[in-house]
Image (cartoon, grey):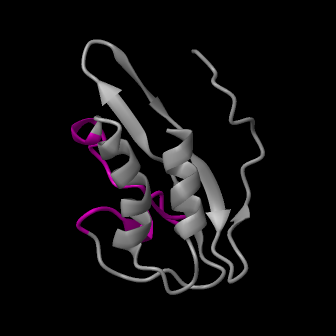
């Protein structure tokens, strides 16, 4: 999951297609054999609403713009077993995303 999230974060540049940013994570998850267990979009914009544009998913259209805050939150959920999700907030920047989340990326079991 960490590799998938880091790939999506790296893809989050001004002008990037929202579908392409989602695919950066989704493709790695599918290659690992868990594509069917990633059932939601990668992330969304952050602002006055809980989920707002830009929406990032396999079926979403649009482009990321400079200085837009977004989430990157890939997750895999296995029925009856559990799941894993990493969720961070970042700001899209030309030189690379500015990560706003400062918590560890080490595995935490809850």
Q: Is residue 77 visible?
A: yes
Magenta span of residues: 35-59
When asked about the image quadrant of residue 79, the answer is: top left
Magenta segment includes 30 = no
Q: Residue at x 40, y 79 (%)?
A: 17
Q: Residue at x 32, y 62 (%)?
A: 57
Q: Is residue 47 visible?
A: no
How far across and how far down the image is residue 105, in percent? 68, 36
How far across and how far down the image is residue 89, in percent? 63, 56
How far across and how far down the image is residue 108, in percent? 64, 21
Work out which quarter of the rendered image holds the C terminus and state it.
Answer: top right
Magenta segment includes 54 = yes
Q: Is residue 6 above or below residue 96?
A: above
How far across and how far down the image is residue 76, in percent? 36, 34
When asked about the image quadrant of residue 70, the answer is: bottom right
Q: Seen in the image, is 30 located left or right of residue 5?
A: left
Q: Seen in the image, is 76 located left or right of residue 89?
A: left
Q: Is residue 94 above or below residue 72?
A: below
| Frontmost residue, 68 versus 29 | 29
Q: Is residue 68 above or below residue 15?
A: above
| Frontmost residue, 54 versus 106 | 106
| Frontmost residue, 10 versus 92 | 10
Q: Residue at x 44, y 67 (%)?
A: 21
Total marks shown come to: 0
Q: Residue at x 54, y 45 (%)?
A: 3
> Residue furthest toward the front?
31
């Amino acid at each position: 999951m960490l590799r998938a999230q880091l790939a999506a974060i790296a893809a989050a540049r001004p002008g990037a297609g929202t579908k392409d940013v989602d695919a950066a994570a989704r493709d790695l998850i599918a290659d690992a054999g868990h594509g069917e267990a990633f059932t939601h979009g990668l992330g969304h914009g952050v602002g006055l609403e809980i989920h707002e544009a830009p929406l990032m998913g396999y079926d979403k259209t649009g482009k990321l713009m400079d200085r837009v805050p977004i989430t990157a939150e890939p997750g895999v959920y296995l029925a009856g077993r559990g799941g894993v999700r990493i969720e961070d907030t970042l700001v899209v920047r030309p030189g690379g995303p500015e990560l706003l989340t400062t918590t560890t990326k080490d595995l935490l079991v809850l």
